[in-house]
Amino acid sequence: MGKSIIKNLFKKQAVLMVFIFLFIIFAFFVPSFFSARNLINILKQSAILGIVACGLTFPVIAGNVDLSVGSIVSLCGVVALSLSYQSIWLAIFIPIVLAVIIGLINGFIVTKFNANSVIITLGSLAVIRGLALIYTGGKMVEGSDASKFILIGRSLIGGVPAYIFIFIIIAVILGIVLNFTTLGRFVYHIGSNIEAGKIAGINIDNIRIYTFIISAVASALAAIILSSRLYTASPLTGNGYEFDAVAAIVVGGSSLFGGKGNIYRTVIGIFFIVMVINAMILLNLPVAFQYIAKAVIIVVAVWLDIRTSRVII
């Protein structure tokens, strides 16, 4: 009976079990890992990328991949910081509008032309990065200490950065949308069986476009927080975010073929990857090993998914 319960728990919560196991190991054997300061650092490192990954979870579950998220972070970041001199509201509103337009274009091309989302968003990644370089002239954008924009990324609540709570709120909202709304159910339907979705009368194109918009807007929110926190922004900021976000989603158990996954598991995937990289930094391991570790984590996650056949929706 006990073995059956443990086996069933491992099937459904394999990533969480491995996460807890590694956390305990690191707490005992990695210097300073379990300190309050380092745990806050893990949360800080997870928050920005976590917002990106949570948004990206939507198109992934719908059977697509949005590789433009990293360049959206760069473009929206430089736009937000440059507008912060004029108004905090412009610095928030304009990047979000820009993200909606980008998501709409990505989604429209993928759906209306039945194009491969990897190819299309890889192309838009390059275009958006180019726009960020043109917008800044290839230079860094710096903020002003006099602007209230700085409060978004540097405010504290009980000694904890406020944007960590923003990340939690965004994750909860997206989780509710994905699991308890009609839009969320339709996202799962078209990711699982697009033909059945058509027969059921689901507007496949619109749902797919919505998922790309959600992904882009989440990246814009991450960009606003990141630029406010660092108070500098570069057209190269966000480089590699698409890889890390996809890695977190896969580690969390989402299928790149669509139809399964959820926000909760994406969050676990983010913490998992950030925790491992954090431990490697504390152990003074070379940066090259961090990339290798990410690749190994992804391979192991896929292997676990096949071996345990866990249910993740």
Image: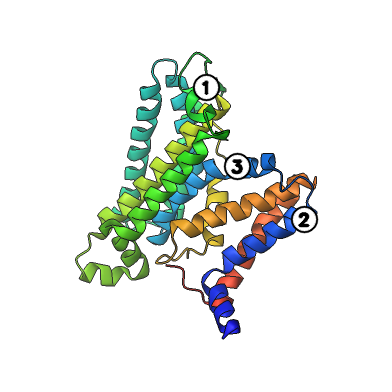
Residue 131 occupies which quadrant of the picture? Answer: top left
**Real-space Cα separation, disc 1 to disc 3, in angstroms:** 28 Å
Q: Is residue 213 left or right of residue 277?
A: left
**Front disc: 2 or 1:** 2
Q: Residue 20 lies in what quarter of the image?
A: bottom right
Label 3: how many residues lie within 10 Å, few (<14), some (14-19) or many (20+)? some
The secondary structure type at the circle numbered 1 is loop
Look at the image and tell me in which quarter the C terminus lies. Answer: bottom left
Pinpoint residue 95: horizontal percent, then vertical percent.
39, 31
Cβ atoms under marks 2 and 1 closer than 8 Å:
no
Which residue is identified by label 1?
A: 137
Give the left or right position of residue 54, taking residue 243 as reference: left
Which amino acid does the dot numbered 1 rest on? Gly
Secondary structure beneath disc 2? helix
For the residues bearing labels 1 and 3, Cβ distance under 8 angstroms: no
**Quick check: 111 above or below 311?**
above
Instruction: Report the Cα–Cα distance between label 2 and label 1.
Output: 48 Å
Residue drawn at x 33%, y 71% is 193
Q: Where is residue 6 in the image (x, y as percent from the top left)?
A: 58, 77
Figure quadrant of the N terminus:
bottom right
Q: What residue type is labelled 3?
A: Gln
Residue at image mark 2: 28
**Percent x, y of residue 299:** 63, 65
Point out the tag, 2 or 1, that comes first from the N-terminus: 2
Residue count near mark 1 (Cα–Cα under 10 Å), binned few <14, some 14–19, many ≥20: few
Q: Can residue 53 be seen in this view?
A: yes
Give the numbered dot on residue 45: 3
